[in-house]
């Protein structure tokens, strides 16, 4: 029996634009998913397609037990975390000796296959290695860790990442002269943000601009706008949609002393807030329970 866990993630900057080769920054966050794998000839059915693919691609058979602190389908990378933790647990249980790099690559291949199309390697890389990562096309660079105080607001509005990615692709085809410069501007905001990582006021402004640009490409939602405005009005440095938009989550950067006020105000709008900070570990071996 082997148990491994993996963290969730938020996009701090650059979602959607990253799909078109622009830079994006994502950060691993504290809530985790833990997966226990045990050798077994008769694995139970009705597991997630990600887990099925972990077993199929490694050619082994086993049972799986999952405990998650991460809400699924909310844009916080729960499928990537489940996939990376399952691969790490399979590697230990069946002595496959996968390196972290191999786990990140295999997890990305599995996400792409299950999602039948475009997925950036962001989620799988960030959950495997932890920390803050700059993604540009196929290149990934780890940035120095920062002790950001983040509040995530889950709008509880369901959304589909693949539909939102498709929506942007269609808008871009219809109005390339409008959408392409917006995607370029998102890339420019990301580059500006990287230079402002230790200046929270400026970083917050970058988040606000990034949010407006995401709204402009059509991935906003009234519930997300309300949460973003609430966070800013109650003391956040800045706030934006995180992930695919159209529902799901937003993220606010806060001064430490304002965390509970901002989170409380967001909850009062009917959302579910999570106060969180960076995870620097990525996948981690856990004691078997
Ligand atoms: C979804 O969390 C982020 C997108 O940029 C898609 C991706 O990067 O795979 C919309």
Image: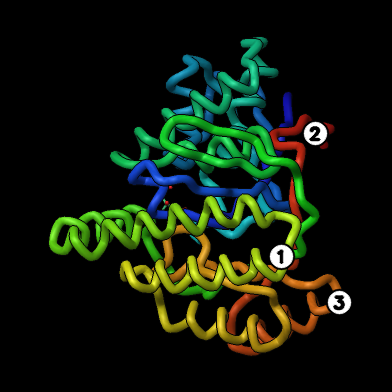
Q: Which residue is mark 2?
A: 286
Which secondary structure lies at badge 1?
Answer: strand
Residue 221 position in % (x across, y down): 40, 77
Q: Which residue is mark 3?
A: 257
Residue at 40%, 68% (x, y): give it.
213
Residue at 71%, 65% (x, y): give it.
150
Q: Is mark 2 within 8 Å of ligand 1?
A: no
Say which quarter of the image contains residue 138: top left
The residues bearing labels 3 and 1 have C-alpha atoms spaced at a distance of 12 Å
Q: Nearer the viewer, residue 111 or 51?
A: 111
Residue 273 position in % (x across, y down): 67, 73
Residue at 37%, 38% (x, y): give it.
114
Task: Report crowding for label 2: few under 14, some 14 to 19, many 20 or more residues within 10 A (C-alpha).
Answer: some
Residue at the extreme left: 174
Q: Is residue 11 left or right of residue 182?
A: right
Which secondary structure lies at badge 3?
Answer: helix
Q: How is the image coloured?
A: rainbow
Residue 149 visible? The answer is: yes
Nearer-N-terminus badge (3/2)? 3
Q: Which residue is mark 1?
A: 150
Task: Report crowding for label 1: few under 14, some 14 to 19, many 20 or more residues within 10 A (C-alpha).
Answer: many
């Amino acid at each position: 029996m082997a148990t491994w866990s993996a963290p969730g993630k938020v996009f701090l900057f650059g979602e959607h634009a990253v799909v078109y080769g622009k830079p994006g920054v994502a950060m691993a966050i504290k809530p985790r998913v833990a997966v226990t794998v045990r050798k077994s000839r008769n694995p139970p059915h009705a597991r997630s397609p990600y887990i099925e693919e972990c077993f199929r691609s490694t050619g082994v058979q086993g049972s799986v037990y999952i405990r998650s602190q991460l809400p699924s389908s909310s844009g916080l990378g729960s499928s990537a975390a489940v996939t990376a933790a399952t691969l790490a647990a399979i590697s230990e249980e069946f002595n496959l000796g996968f390196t972290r790099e191999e786990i990140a690559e295999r997890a990305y291949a599995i996400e792409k296959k299950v999602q039948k199309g475009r997925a950036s390697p962001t989620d799988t890389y960030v959950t495997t290695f932890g920390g803050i990562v700059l993604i540009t096309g196929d290149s990934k660079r780890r940035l120095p860790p920062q002790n950001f105080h983040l509040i995530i607001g889950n709008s509880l509005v369901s959304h589909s990442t693949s539909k939102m990615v498709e929506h942007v692709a269609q808008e871009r085809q219809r109005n390339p002269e409008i959408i392409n410069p917006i995607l370029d501007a998102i890339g420019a905001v990301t580059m500006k943000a990287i230079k402002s990582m230790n200046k929270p006021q400026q970083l917050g402004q970058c988040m606000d601009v990034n949010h407006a640009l995401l709204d402009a490409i059509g991935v906003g939602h009234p519930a997300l706008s309300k949460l973003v405005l609430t966070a800013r009005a109650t003391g956040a440095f800045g706030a934006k949609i995180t992930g695919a938009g159209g529902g799901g989550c937003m993220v606010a950067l806060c001064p430490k002393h304002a965390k509970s006020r901002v989170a409380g105000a967001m909850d009062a709008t009917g959302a579910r807030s999570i106060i969180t900070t960076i995870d620097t570990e990525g996948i981690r071996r856990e004691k078997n329970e």
